[in-house]
Amino acid sequence: MTPRAADFRIPGELLAEMRRWRNRALLVGALGTVLTAVGMVAVSANQFYRSYLWAYVFVLGLSLGPMAWLMLQYVTGGAWGVIIRRPAEAAVRTLPLVAVMFLPVVLGMNNLYPWMPVHHRALPAHQAQWLTPGFFLARAAVYFAGWLVLGWLFNRWSAEEDRDGRAAARRKLGWLAGPGLVFWGLAVSFMSIDWILSVKPEWFSTMFPLLTIVGQALTAMAFLIALLVLLWFRQPMSGVLTPRHLHDLGKFLLALVMVWAYFSFSQFLIIWAGNLPEEIPWYQVRLNNGWQAVALLLVVGHFALPFALLLSRDLKRNFKLLAWIAGFVLAMRLVDLYWQIAPYFRSGGFGLSWLDVTAPMGLVGLWLAHFLTQLSRRPLIGPNEPALEEALAHGRE
């Protein structure tokens, strides 16, 4: 396929299939949402908010992680980013929905966060100044405002490049990507402190924001790989994607699995060596009363198994096997977030509520339906992409 002859608009057959995927996702999302709402009334409002929080953090990564990859590609260039740019842009366009999904977290602040005034918990002065309801909501507004503006600008200028082919749009995209990455990293770091760590305000870790950043990047890369393999069976992507494209993305997946393991072990080692009473309870809870089995699952499933498999060059070039590994990594991301957040609320030991199943089912289903709607609105590769020729030749030299 040559750049001049290429037509990356979604053909009617694929559009019809994407509508079927969207309808199935919407059905699953609607069912999960209804069951979760029923659980809130019939089971426990507290359990609803607790299940919703960790599921929401996962869905947030599906939107914010692709934004980071999008900006990184504009900063660095390369053929690897051309094939993921449109799916990443579509994921970013789901941020308005994700912002609306944040409302139950706001409504459940009294149920989730022990520093809320209703709990009357005494905190050190520096924490008391930071953890106030008004300041918490103001920071959340800043995070979402920045993310939404970045997403809007990147998609607007990308559409401008498609329409006019102007180099000015590309310069603006490159100019915004660097500062955008800085804001993204800072916002995700503070978000992890506000929305996750403050559930247990006595505990703190300087490594935790880095774990959240890597976790979102890993979630996004695994999702994009699985999506690309799904599209590879159909035109126009069947004429674009080569094993070398997937090999490049597979190397990113391997690197992120290793970085996640490194940061996780570093956090554990620092806290174990320090042996401070304000730090060790976090791991004491998560390594006892059944949670140690989840920790072992993460060691094997989130690191050892994907690491061993992704070392293989041939496997990273095998579309179906790489997609299965990417899907497995996504499942492990859900387990990791549950292990991070749920023990805060289950002091009696490991356990699962059926709301821990329906909440992610509802949120992920609705997110996927909206994502597929956004993905179907633009060509799968930009027709005026500067690196298009390089991307089409990648793996065919």
Image (cartoon, grey):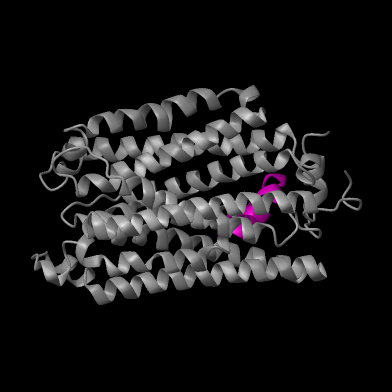
Question: From this viewpoint, is residue 207 visible?
Answer: no
Question: Where does the C terminus fall, quadrant-wise?
Answer: top right
Residue 24 lies, in percent from the top left, at 57, 50
| Depth check, front residue: 18 or 116 | 18
User: Residue 292, percent across and down?
Assistant: 24, 30
Magenta residues, dominant SS class: helix
Q: Is residue 382 above or below residue 280?
A: below
Tell me which segment is drawn in magenta.
72-91
Residue 84 magenta-highlighted: yes
Viewer-proximal residue, 252 or 63?
Answer: 63
**Residue sitting at x 35%, y 55%:** 36
Q: Is residue 62 left or right of residue 248?
A: left
Residue 189 drawn at (x, y percent): 37, 57
Give the camera-side residue of 45 and 332.
Answer: 45
353 on left or right of 186: left
Residue 277 versus residue 199: which sits nearer the camera?
199
- The vertical placement of 298 against 148, above or below, is above
The image quarter containing residue 177 is bottom right
Reply yes or no: does residue 393 show up in magenta. Answer: no
Q: Quadrant of the N terminus?
A: top right
Residue drawn 81% across the image and 67% down it: 165
Residue 89 lies, with reference to residue 143, above or below; the image says above
From the top left corner, tell me how far across and down residue 73 is, in percent: 63, 53
